[in-house]
Structure formats: C-alpha cells, structure tokens
Amino acid sequence: MNYNPNNIFAKILRGEIPAYKVYEDTQTLAFMDVMPQSDGHTLVIPRVAAETLFDLSTEELQSLIAVTQRIAIAAKRAFHADGMTLMQFNGSAAGQTVPHVHFHVIPRYNGKSLQSHSRTMANNELLAQHAEHLRALLNP
Ligand code: 5GP
C-alpha cells in the first residue's frame, strides 16, 4: 500500500483542516461532505491510514461498516429521507477522488436525483445546521 498522508481526509483526522464532524470514536470519524450529492450527505472514515477497502483488516472493516450503518440510520431519521444510498469507491478508475478509504452515506428523496459527485460546494451555514441536526441524534 502506498498511502499518501497529505490527502485531505488525513489532514481532517490530524485536525489540520476543519470539518463538520458528526460522530467520532477511537477507530472512526464521520463528517459532512462539503460537496453533497443530496442534503445530509455524510462521509465515514477509519482513523487507520488506508487508501482503499482492500487495505483494511477484517476487524477495521467491521467497525467501519458498523458505524456506517449507525450513521445511515440516524441520517435517514434526521433528514426525513425516503431511502439511503451507501457508496464506496476504490481507485481513481472507480471514481475515488480522495485516497483515504470512506463510505458515502447519502439520503435519498422521492423524485430527486443525485447532484454530481464532488462538484458544488455547499453553503457553510447549511452544512453546520445539518451537522448539528445529525449530531443531536448520534450523540444524545
Ligand atoms: P470519493 O470521490 O473519493 O469517493 O469521495 C470524496 C468525497 O470527499 C467527495 O464526495 C467530495 O465532495 C468530498 N470532499 C472533497 N474534499 C473535501 C473536504 O475538504 N472536506 C469534506 N468534508 N469533504 C470533501
């Protein structure tokens, strides 16, 4: 594995750049995607330095998917979503743009298609509101 420690999620994990965090534990961090594909789009990442899903141990993967499920359940409630899309890309050929493994948790709404991937920055106030809303359900 050739992990690049200067990727944007590694910087968020080290606290070098800010993020709208919604949940964290010893192994995992979840925060709002700054270019959401729908309202409430959240990212879930492991703290371990891993580029793709294939670089995780079984235990690391288990804790990541368990937290992803927890975030998805809370986000469905928080944003009154009709459904939830979970996405995960491995390698640039597959659409991965940030080389630190992550799950996308994307609320879906009837009749609404997804915004383009990694395209339009959301309003900071809206992201902060969404994060607060989700945090309240995840950390009661
Ligand atoms: P990928 O294309 O690697 O599956 O997804 C990377 C995701 O990270 C994209 O959805 C993109 O919008 C998001 N993203 C890129 N840069 C930043 C950032 O600086 N902060 C946050 N919170 N999300 C980011």
Image (cartoon, rainbow, N blue to C red):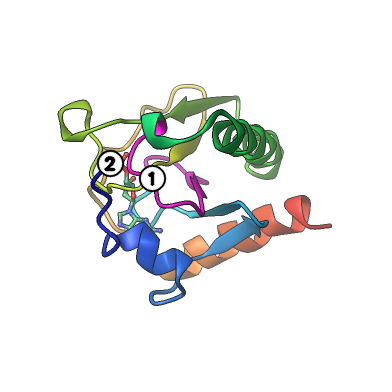
Q: Nearer the viewer, residue 25 or 85?
A: 25
Residue furthest to the bottom: 16
Q: Nearer the viewer, residue 121 or 65?
A: 65
Residue that badge 2 annotates: 1
Residue 122 makes an appearance in the image: no
Q: How many marks?
A: 2
Dominant SS of magenta comes to: loop
Residue furthest to the left: 93
The residue tagged with tag 1: helix, strand or loop?
Answer: loop
The answer to if 50 sits in the magenta stretch is: yes
Residue at image position (65%, 35%) is 76
Residue 84: x and y, percent?
Answer: 55, 27
Q: Nearer the viewer, residue 82 or 93?
A: 93
Q: Classify the position of the C terminus by image quarter.
A: bottom right
Q: Which residues are magenta?
A: 37-53
Residue furthest to the right: 140
Whether 113 is drawn above or below 119: the answer is above
**Structural distance between the alpha carbons of marks 1 and 2:** 8 Å
Q: Is residue 45 left or right of residue 99?
A: right
Q: Which mark is residue 50?
A: 1
**Mark 2 CB in 8 Å range of ligand 1?**
no
